[in-house]
Image (cartoon, rainbow, N blue to C red):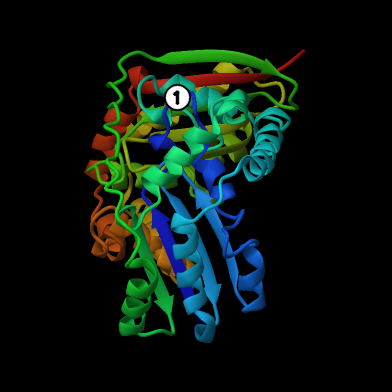
């Protein structure tokens, strides 16, 4: 098998308001076909292959797995739609309607579905992370002009704005030959990435309360942290596992099992390239006042700011990171994606160094990171309450 991953350096952060959701819409349009390939999936399926894609705020990835004797098909088809995508009104309207239905299902008609949109708008005032990949508003997808979609495609979809990662039963010389054959004639676009505004340091707490038709009260908390290449990234990720390491994390053990203040709770980081967020998502147990539940979370966060994490607890988290790293790289599809992401950041070796970076995090670094991370002035707190 051969695993093919083409990663474009474009995501929702490259959109210009009010045309949010554009990168995700274009991902859908990439499956609409070209003059040479009217149906993108069918030739790959006939060749024994599978394919899919995803969009984040930072990147857009297209990935294919094929038997090695049909691997050249991936090179041809991806190079074809890199420069020959058909973007007529009929095709655009089909996918536009599909994305609008997805927006309704995930953000409007799903319990708690709009929480992420509310939180992003609370936490970010300048940076385009203030909207998610699906878009800020349904109207943004409905109203984006065809010429804007075409311009976005022409600007960002080019060989010099992409990383091609190949994993599997294929020689390096063969990859070079087919890359030059199918991508070599496509001109570079020299797309200049927009200079994104840096989010100002948050110094005052932000709070909001909304009422929705949901079964349980929910409490959401967000804290600004560094981006993927910043020094606090690894300590903050370690903190997220200390707090929410499955059933043995502090929040689950102390606040769900022992004190029964929550029915569920989770802590995680956004993992974004630019400065991101540390999130705590929770559902408050029936009968528990939300302000009491919030106070209990703050008590746990304060303990991380004031006390060193015990050595055995820290070691347990580090061991989990190492095992997860190994499992994440077992499959060719995952490995090709992870390598492409590291290359996009400028250093493929950084991916393979991750276990060492996590192992090097000290208890003192965790406490130092927690002191900056869990400042009251760095918080965005959303009370998401059920209607009476």
- Count neighbours of disc 1 (C-alpha within 10 A) and say few if under 14, some if 14 to 19, many if 20 or more: few
- Which of 241/86 is in front? 86
Q: Position of residue 5 (x, y in %)?
A: 44, 65
Give coordinates of residue 168: x percent, y percent: 44, 80
The residue closer to the viewer here, 20 or 348, is: 20
Tell me how many marks there are.
Answer: 1
Of residue 122 and residue 103, the one placed in the foreground of this image is 103
Give the residue at mark 1: 17
The image shows residue 167 at horizontal and vertical percentages of 41, 75
As drawn, is 285 to the left or to the right of 35? right
> Is 296 on the left or on the right of 339, as rendered?
right
Which of the image's four quarters has the C terminus?
top right
Residue at the image position 24 percent from the left and 35 percent from the top: 368
Q: In which quadrant of the rendered view does residue 352 lie?
A: bottom left
- 188 and 61: which one is in front? 188
Tell me which residue sits at (56%, 16%) in the image: 291
Q: Secondary structure at mark 1?
A: loop
Confirm whether residue 352 shows in the render. Answer: yes
Q: Position of residue 39 (x, y in %)?
A: 65, 62
Q: Which image quarter: residue 89?
A: top right
Residue, x 53% and y 40% (percent of image)? Answer: 266
Q: Residue sitting at 33 percent across and 65 percent down?
A: 185
Q: Please say if 176 is above or below 199.
A: below
As drawn, is 15 to the left or to the right of 107? left
Camera sees residue 296: no
């Amino acid at each position: 098998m051969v695993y093919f991953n083409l990663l474009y350096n474009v995501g929702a952060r490259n959109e210009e308001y009010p045309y949010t959701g554009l990168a995700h819409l274009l991902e859908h349009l990439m499956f609409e076909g070209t003059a040479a390939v009217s149906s993108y999936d069918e030739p790959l399926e006939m060749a024994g292959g599978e394919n899919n894609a995803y969009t984040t705020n930072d990147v857009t990835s297209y990935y294919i797995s094929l038997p090695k004797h049909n691997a050249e098909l991936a090179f041809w088809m991806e190079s074809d739609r890199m420069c020959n995508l058909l973007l007529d009104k009929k095709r655009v309207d089909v996918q536009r309607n599909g994305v609008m239905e997805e927006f309704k299902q995930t953000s409007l008609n799903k319990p708690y579905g709009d929480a992420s949109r509310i939180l992003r708008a609370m936490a970010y005032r300048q940076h385009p992370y203030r909207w998610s990949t699906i878009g800020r508003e349904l109207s943004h997808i409905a109203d984006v002009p065809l010429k804007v979609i075409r311009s976005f495609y022409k600007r960002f979809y080019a060989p010099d704005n992409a990383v091609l990662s190949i994993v599997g039963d294929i020689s390096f010389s063969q990859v070079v030959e087919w890359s030059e054959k199918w991508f070599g004639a496509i001109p570079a676009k020299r797309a200049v990435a927009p200079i994104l505004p840096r989010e100002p340091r948050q110094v005052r707490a932000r709070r909001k309360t909304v009422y929705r038709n949901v079964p349980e009260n929910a409490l959401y908390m967000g804290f600004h942290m560094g981006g993927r290449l910043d020094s606090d990234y690894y300590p903050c990720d370690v903190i997220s596992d200390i707090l929410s390491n499955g059933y043995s994390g502090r929040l689950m053990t102390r606040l769900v099992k022992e004190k029964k203040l929550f029915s569920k709770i989770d802590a995680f980081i956004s993992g974004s390239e630019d400065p991101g967020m540390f999130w705590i998502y929770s559902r408050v147990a029936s009968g528990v006042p939300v302000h009491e539940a919030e106070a209990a979370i703050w008590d746990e966060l304060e303990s991380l700011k004031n006390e060193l994490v015990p050595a055995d607890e820290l070691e347990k988290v580090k061991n989990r990171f190492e095992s997860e790293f190994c499992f994440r790289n077992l499959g060719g599809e995952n490995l090709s994606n992870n390598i492409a992401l590291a290359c996009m950041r400028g250093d493929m070796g950084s991916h393979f160094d991750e276990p060492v970076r996590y192992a090097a995090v000290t208890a003192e670094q965790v406490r130092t990171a927690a002191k900056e991370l869990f400042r009251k002035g760095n918080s965005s707190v959303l009370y998401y309450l059920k209607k009476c």
